């Protein structure tokens, strides 16, 4: 069995630092700093963050929920992000959305002239 290579902390920090959006940065940090999986990060709701304590619902361990503590700076950035985006307590912090799909009834030439992200 091939041995897994562990990425150096400095490399992980550099990847996070170079993220262009605060959303992407805040999605990567709980994974790097707390060991959360991407699915756990995507399921986080504003109500799951209380101070530095983070409640993880339906973790991979099979339990109903688990709790963990975030570094103070990360907890503050998440709280600021939640407030800045007016995310309600029952809403996901990082909802997934996709660009609008092209209308299949349009002709090929009409599809090319339509932007992927709207008119």
Image (cartoon, helix red, strand yellow):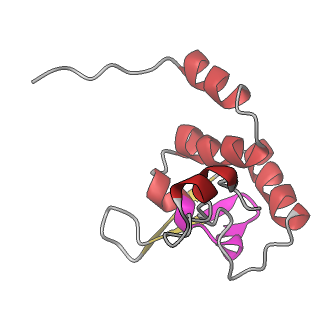
Instruction: Specify whether residue 50 is painted magenta.
Output: yes
Q: Residue furthest left?
A: 1
**Residue depicted at x 82% and y 52%:** 76
Question: Based on the displayed image, in which of its 4 quarters is residue 48 positioned?
Answer: bottom right
Expressed as whole percent of the image width and height from the top left, the position of residue 3 reads: 20, 20
Of 100 and 105, the residue lying toward us: 105
Expressed as whole percent of the image width and height from the top left, the position of residue 74 reads: 74, 46
User: Is 107 rendered above or below residue 27?
Assistant: below
**Residue depicted at x 48% and y 60%:** 40
Task: Specify whether 4 is left or right of 81.
Answer: left
Expressed as whole percent of the image width and height from the top left, the position of residue 108 reads: 52, 55
Q: Residue furthest right?
A: 84
Of 30 and 23, the residue lying toward us: 23
Task: Specify whether 96 is left or right of 49.
Answer: left
Question: Based on the displayed image, in which of its 4 quarters is residue 81 positioned?
Answer: bottom right
Write down the region rendered in magenta: 42-54
Instruction: Specify whether residue 44 is painted magenta.
Output: yes
**Residue depicted at x 68% and y 83%:** 90
**Residue depicted at x 88% and y 66%:** 83
Question: Based on the displayed image, in which of its 4 quarters is residue 101 positioned?
Answer: bottom right
The number of callouts visible is 0
Question: Looking at the rendering, in which quadrant would you find the C terminus?
Answer: bottom right
Expressed as whole percent of the image width and height from the top left, the position of residue 68 reads: 56, 57
Question: Looking at the rendering, in which quadrant would you find the N terminus?
Answer: top left
């Amino acid at each position: 069995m091939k041995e897994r290579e562990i990425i150096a902390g400095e490399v992980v920090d550099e990847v996070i630092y170079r993220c262009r959006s605060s959303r992407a940065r805040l999605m990567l940090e709980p994974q790097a700093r707390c060991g959360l999986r991407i699915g756990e990060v995507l399921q986080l709701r504003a109500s799951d963050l209380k101070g530095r304590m983070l409640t993880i619902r339906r973790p991979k361990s099979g339990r109903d929920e688990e709790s963990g503590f975030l570094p103070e700076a990360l907890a503050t950035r998440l709280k600021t992000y939640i407030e800045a985006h007016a995310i309600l307590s029952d809403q996901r912090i990082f909802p997934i959305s996709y660009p609008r799909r092209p209308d299949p009834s349009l002709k090929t030439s009409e599809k090319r002239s339509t932007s992927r992200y709207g008119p």
